[in-house]
Amino acid sequence: MATSDAFRELLARAARPLPAATWSEPEDLVRLGRESLVADEHGDARVLASDGTLRLHGPGVVGHAVDLEEAGAISTLWQRAVTAVGAAIDGVTTARGKVRADIRARTRLSLVAAPGLGSVVLSIAPKSPPLLEVAPDGAKPLVDVPRPLADQASVRLVELLAEAATATPETTETVSSHFRDLGPRVASALQGLSSTLADGEISLDVAWREPEAPTARASLSASQARWLKEFIEGRELDASIDDLEGVAVTVSNKERWLVETELGPERIVASELTLDEVRRVQPGDTVQLRVRTTTRTQADGTTRTRREALEVLDVIQPDSTEPPETPNE
């Protein structure tokens, strides 16, 4: 009887439709097999760490050699992009200020370089232990299992890069919208990355492997990187418009203003303001400005931030320190 039941179960399984393929290369099948064995032994493949690869190739890579400065810039910019996407996922999309320390820690990656055929392969992995966020108290939740931020950010970044690399005139608005959803900090990091790839004539193949999930992949040629750089800059995706408040230290219709804010002093270009708007503000006034902030990555890997005042929203004069006049009796 038991044999008959087992046979019927076998026939029932054979009749079920096959699930959608979650692999695209033979190495994916090897990974699925390894994760299955680990899950059988430990009850969860999440004990394995996620990992990824950044494969550099193209005219700018000779054999297994690539310019050290360019490789360093690509690694730094990839980390910056992952952290920026992680911040956006956590609800922080503004370009002002620093990313919170906890977000930086949760998206930090480690790097191990290894040669590949006609390329240089940079192997990357989360710096945090794999179960730190999945099972913070030592026990994995039965529902709503947390997903490590490094995985969320890396996969989202790879998806965005793949979407941009395959963009057509019909899909550019969608790509632009997805960039704006993630904020200018992400666009700025990818502007710097694509600029470095284009200038160095380097193509990038990236993959991210998360346990129990399909491998995320994207490829960006040097020419596609050049297009992406121009796309981000042309649409000002690395710029944001925000309100800024502070005390005006210097005011001019020609030179940059110096405004002391809660986050520190800011140099603000005021060339877009009318002369009447400039005359409203005196040194010492508390001023509220509508400001466009653009962050660009330079050839040496440093970033340059430009803040440009678009409108004077409000001016508050400082309280007078002189005693009020008493009326003559």
Image: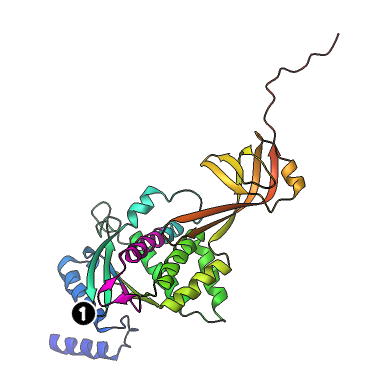
Seen at 31% across and 83% down, the residue is: 24
Q: How is the image coloured?
A: rainbow
Residue found farthest to the top: 329
Task: Tell me if residue 261 comes above or below residue 62 in the rendering.
Answer: above
Residue at 67% across, 48% down: 254
Tally of numbered discs: 1
Per the rendered image, the range of residues in magenta is 55-83
Q: Position of residue 64 (x, y in %)?
A: 25, 75
The amino acid pointed to by label 1 is Val
View extreme (right): residue: 329
Q: Magenta span has 80?
A: yes
**Magenta span includes 193:** no
**What kind of element bears circle 1?**
helix
In the depicted structure, whether residue 285 falls above or below residue 132: above
Q: Is residue 218 above or below residue 128?
A: below
Image quadrant where one finds the C terminus: top right
Left or right of residue 62: residue 195: right
Q: Foreground: 153 or 195?
A: 195
Q: Is residue 192 left or right of residue 18?
A: right
Residue 42 coordinates in the image, percent (x, y): 17, 65
Identify which residue, 234 or 49, lies in the foreground.
234
The quarter holding residue 7 reads: bottom left
Residue beneath the point at 48% across and 58% down: 185
What residue sits right under mark 1 in the picture? 30
- Quadrant placement of the N terminus: bottom left
Q: Position of residue 38 (x, y in %)?
A: 17, 70
Residue 198 versus residue 76: which sits nearer the camera?
Answer: 198
Among the 4 quarters of the image, the one containing residue 173: bottom right
